[in-house]
Image: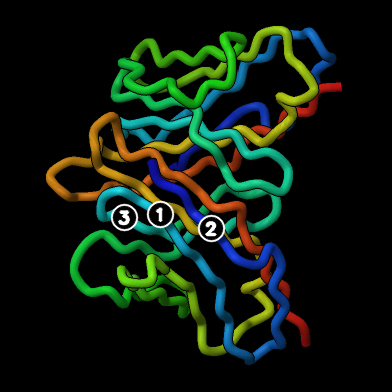
């Protein structure tokens, strides 16, 4: 079956431009996560959705970052007025359900979108 | 809050040699622990995980890891390295404390396998 897909795979933006990154989770997956991976670093959590509800956005670095998942499936991460420090790989992950009752549900990762801000 | 430390950003081994990638964590409550592998231009793939139960966990591709609570460690090993193991490896921790089960990653260890 299809895994998590992300588009575009590569994006080059001029400083100050707005960008939108798309994530298509595995069909039926309730939970969706966005992570930011800077060069040479591990991924860092940005935000989390359970269905269409954004339950945790504590990792968003500034108010220029905005994420949505209006119908509980596809999600878009939008970055306004991009800056050079936004250059990173943005990873999306989905899992079947929210972890509960001591049962962990594996997060499946997409290939990421590499954003370069010039 | 939880954190992960991976000792050694680069590890080089000979083909057929033992692979040992180190991971230490800090957490205020018992964590769930993971190792992920990332090949160039690809997403993260789960190698193995510890949630509860047996502290020695086996994963894909011959990797295994042991959860040692007293040492707050979760080191990854493989008895015999293969060229195809060359990749970046990330240790991660998660807490099921509500709000999903977001992962906190270490900074990664690049594994090089030499002939």
Mark 2 and mark 1: Cα distance apart in space: 9 Å
> Residue A76: percent from the left, percent from the top?
52, 18
Identify the subunit bearing mark 2. Answer: B
Q: Secondary structure at mark 2?
A: strand
Side of A33 relative to A90 (left or right):
left
> Residue A94: percent from the left, percent from the top?
39, 37
Which quarter of the picture shows residue B108? bottom right
Verify CB contact (< 8 Å) between mark 1 and mark 3. no
Circle on res. B5: 2
> Residue B114: percent from the left, percent from the top?
77, 82
Please tell me if label 2 and label 1 are on a single chain: yes
| First in sequence: mark 3 vs mark 2 | 2
How many C-alpha atoms fall within 10 Å of the one at disc 2: few (<14), some, or many (≥20)? some
> Residue A46: percent from the left, percent from the top?
50, 28
Verify CB contact (< 8 Å) between mark 2 and mark 1. yes
Identify the subunit bearing mark 3. Answer: B
Residue sitting at the far left? A101
| First in sequence: mark 1 vs mark 3 | 1
Where is A4 relative to A21, above or below? below
Q: Can see residue A1?
A: no
Q: Looking at the picture, tell me which residue is in the foreground, B71 or B94.
A: B71
Residue depicted at 49% across the width and 34% down the height: A45
Q: Looking at the picture, tell me which residue is in the foreground, B83 or B72.
A: B72
| Of the two numbered discs 1 and 3 in the rendering, the one whose residue sits closer to the viewer | 1
Side of B54 relative to A27 (left or right):
left
How many C-alpha atoms fall within 10 Å of the one at disc 3: few (<14), some, or many (≥20)? many
The image's colouring method is rainbow
Q: Secondary structure at mark 1?
A: strand
What residue is shown with label 1?
A: B26
What residue is shown with label 3?
A: B32
Residue depicted at 51% across the width and 49% down the height: B105
């Amino acid at each position: 079956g299809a895994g998590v897909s992300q588009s575009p795979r590569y994006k080059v933006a001029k400083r100050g431009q707005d960008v939108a990154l798309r994530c298509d989770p595995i069909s039926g997956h309730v939970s969706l996560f966005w992570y930011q991976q800077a060069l040479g670093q591990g991924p860092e959590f940005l935000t989390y959705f359970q269905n269409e509800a954004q339950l945790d956005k504590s990792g968003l670095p500034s108010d220029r970052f905005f994420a949505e998942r209006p119908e509980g499936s596809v999600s878009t991460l939008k970055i306004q007025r991009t800056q050079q420090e936004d250059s990173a790989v943005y990873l999306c992950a989905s899992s079947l359900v929210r972890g509960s009752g001591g049962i962990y549900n594996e997060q499946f990762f997409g290939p990421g979108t590499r954003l370069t801000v010039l | 809050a939880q954190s992960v430390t991976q000792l050694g950003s680069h590890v080089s081994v000979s083909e057929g040699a033992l692979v040992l990638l180190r991971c230490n964590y800090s957490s205020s409550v018992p964590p769930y622990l993971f190792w992920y592998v990332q090949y160039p231009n690809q997403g993260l793939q789960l190698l193995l995980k510890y949630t509860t139960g047996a502290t020695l966990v086996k994963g894909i591709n011959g990797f295994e890891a042991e959860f040692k609570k007293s040492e707050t460690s979760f080191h990854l090993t493989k008895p015999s390295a293969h060229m195809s193991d060359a990749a970046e490896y990330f240790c991660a921790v998660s807490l099921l404390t509500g709000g999903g089960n977001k992962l906190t990653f270490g900074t990664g260890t690049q594994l090089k396998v030499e002939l």
